[in-house]
Each structure stands twice: as C-alpha cells, then as structure tokens.
Image (cartoon, rainbow, N blue to C red):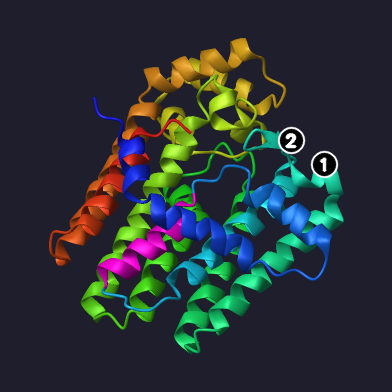
C-alpha cells in the first residue's frame, strides 16, 4: 500500500517550505515574549494543512499573484490562537507532544498572545484591500468562538444529540477550512461557481478532519496523537463515536459507558472497555462512515475544475484525512 502522506509531502514540498518562511517573516511582534509563546505553538510540528489548502485552492482557481503564501499565514495564526485559548479552557497539559504554553508562561500571557495572533491575521487580511476578505476572516473568528462556547456550555452533556455535535464542529473547525478555500477564490477573482466549489471542498474537509480527529482520541498511543490518552473525554467533550454508541447501547451497557465518561480520572482499563463498547455499538464505524461521506463530497466538488496536478493533490489530501494516524 502506497504511503499517501509521503506522496503528498513530496508534491507540496516547495509550498510548505515557502509557507514556513512566511509564518516566521510575517509574525512581526513587538515583544520577544510574543515570538517565544507563538513559536511554541506555531513551530511544534503542525501539519500546515489550512494554509496549504488556501494556497492550493488559489492555484486551482487560477491565482497569478505573489501574495498567496503570505496570506495563507492568516489561517495558521488563527488556528494557533484558538489552540492557545482552548488549552487553557480545557485544562489540557500536552499539545503536540509538548507542555501547553500556559503551563510555561502562565494563563494571562497565553491568552494575550492568542489575541495578538487573531489581530495579526486580520492585519494581513486588511493588506489585500478587499472588504469581502476582511468580512470573511471576521466571520470565521466569530464562528470559531461561538463553536467553542457552545461546546463549553454542553461540556459533559450525555444527552448531546448528533445534530448539535455537527453544528459545534462546523463552527469550531469546518468554517476555518471553508474560509481558507473561499478566500482563495476571492483573491483569484474566480467565478461564483468556482468559489462555491472550493468552499464546498473546504467545508467537507473540515467536517471530515474533525471527525477523524475525534476518532484519534480512542487510541492508546499518546506519542502518536501528541496529547493525553482519552483527553477529549477527560475534558468533557462528547464526540460522535460516543454520541452514536450511547444512542444504540442497551440499558446496562449505556450505564457502564456513562459511569466511565462521568469519571474524569478513569483508568486505562476502563478506557479500553469503553473503546470495546464503542466498537460493539458501531460508534467507531459510524463516525468513519460519516467522515468518508464528507471526503467523497469534498472530492466531488472539485469536478468543476479540469484534471490537473493541483486537483490531484487536493484529492489526495481528502483521502489522507481518513487514513491519518496523527
């Protein structure tokens, strides 16, 4: 079986190097501590998926300028800002295999550096001179904040329905993917048809990516996922594998699952039992199937564009969303 990740990285090597340079060159903080804290989260091994999708979407829309790499940094800065804030809200201890920033520099500093990254993203957006672009970025930020608030309000809610979960992940994850791709069309002066196509690709990619990410929580390999085993459950996040299994379980097994979920200090043995129950009642398989449907929908939207190397890369990235292990 071919190594899809390696194949993709080979095809986008030049783009990733240029994105990495742009992330450093366009940070531009006034204080060194901002660079230190931002660098802790920005350069800790992130996949650069959001800026990469922005660059590739611009290319497939026929972008001819030289601002795409700079502009792509917006989406990594926004993402990094939310991670800084989320780790504090969630009480997380590990991010990408490293101690969370607030455990090193303190809560106040982590929050303020997150605020800086959000503002930096808007400053770069303003440099396009396109009000539509600034409006989209502002809308993304609003949606992501509300998505996180919604999730916080429903923390540990065993009655969370699938529809509510889908709305949360749309706001907190999919809108950033969708916005990155949509703005590519804006700066490329693409047609409405092309804008809808790349926006649809981004939305479906974001939904699939989050579902796949939720599945990664049900692994015992914390070295691979870069966070504590069962972190989502310990933080009270009800994700699709659990939501579906709880709905399908008989009374006794549901009570067993609820007891484990309610105990934030559950043991590895309990977590293994929970995984078995998620598998027994189809929570894992159902989530994989929902993610697969979004991947297929993402690839279908690209049929608007003629076959090309760029379209092929975007299709490969969609397939990778399902097969990734980290």
Nearer to me, 285 or 322:
322
Residue shown at the point (57%, 42%) measured from the top left: 45
Query: Local crowd at mark 2 within 10 Å, few (<14), some, or many (≥20)?
Result: some
Residue 253 drawn at (x, y percent):
49, 17
**Is 63 positioned to the left or the right of 114 in the image?**
left
Residue 196 drawn at (x, y percent):
27, 71
Name the magenta segment's main secondary structure: helix
Q: Which mark is residue 93?
A: 2
Answer whether labels 1 and 2 touch (C-beta < 8 Å). Answer: yes
The reply to whether residue 269 is visible in this rendering is yes
Residue shown at the point (42%, 38%) measured from the top left: 212
Residue shown at the point (76%, 53%) measured from the top left: 37
**Is 308 positioned to the left or the right of 57 in the image?**
left
Residue 183 drawn at (x, y percent):
41, 74
Verify whether residue 54 appears in magenta: yes
Verify whether residue 275 appears in magenta: no
**Is 168 positioned to the left or the right of 309 in the image?**
right
Number of marks in picture: 2
Q: Which mark is residue 15?
A: none
Assign a secondary structure to mark 2: loop
- On the image, numbered disc 1 is attached to which residue? 103
Q: CA distance from mark 1 to mark 2?
A: 7 Å
Query: Local crowd at mark 1 within 10 Å, few (<14), some, or many (≥20)?
Result: some
Assign a secondary structure to mark 1: helix
Residue 300 drawn at (x, y percent):
18, 55
Nearer to me, 17 or 318:
17
Provide the residue span drawn in magenta: 48-61
Identify the mark nearer the N-term, 1 or 2: 2
Q: Is residue 129 above or below residue 24?
A: below
Nearer to me, 305 or 268:
305
Q: Quadrant of residue 288?
A: top left
């Amino acid at each position: 079986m071919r190594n899809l990740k390696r194949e993709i990285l080979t095809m986008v090597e030049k783009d990733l190097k240029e994105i990495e340079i742009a992330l450093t060159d366009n940070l531009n903080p006034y204080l060194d501590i901002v660079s230190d804290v931002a660098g802790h989260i920005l350069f800790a091994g992130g996949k650069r998926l959001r800026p990469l999708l922005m660059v590739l979407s611009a290319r497939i829309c026929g972008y001819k300028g030289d601002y795409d790499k700079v502009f792509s940094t917006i989406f990594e800065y926004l993402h990094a800002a939310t991670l800084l804030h989320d780790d504090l809200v969630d009480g997380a201890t590990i991010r990408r295999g490293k101690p969370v920033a607030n455990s090193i520099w303190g809560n106040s500093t982590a929050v303020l550096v997150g605020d800086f990254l959000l503002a930096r993203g808007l400053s770069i957006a303003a440099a396009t001179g396109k009000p539509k672009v600034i409006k989209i970025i502002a809308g993304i930020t609003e949606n992501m904040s509300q998505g996180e608030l919604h999730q916080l309000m429903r923390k540990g809610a065993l009655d969370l329905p699938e529809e509510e979960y889908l709305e949360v992940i749309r706001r907190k994850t999919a809108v950033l993917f969708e916005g990155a791709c949509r703005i590519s069309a804006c700066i490329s002066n693409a047609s409405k048809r092309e804008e809808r196509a790349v926006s649809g690709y981004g939305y479906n990619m974001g939904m699939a990516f989050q579902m796949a990410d939720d599945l990664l929580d049900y692994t015992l390999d914390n070295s691979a996922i870069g966070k504590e085993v069962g972190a989502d459950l310990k933080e009270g996040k009800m994700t699709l594998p659990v939501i579906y299994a709880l709905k399908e379980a008989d009374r006794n097994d549901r009570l067993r699952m609820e007891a484990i979920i309610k105990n934030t200090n559950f043991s590895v043995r309990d977590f293994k039992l929970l995984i078995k129950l998620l598998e027994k009642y189809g929570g894992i398989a159902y989530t994989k199937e929902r993610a697969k449907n979004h991947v297929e929908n993402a690839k279908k939207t690209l049929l608007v564009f003629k076959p090309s190397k760029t379209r092929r890369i975007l299709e490969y990235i969609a397939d990778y969303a399902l097969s990734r292990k980290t």
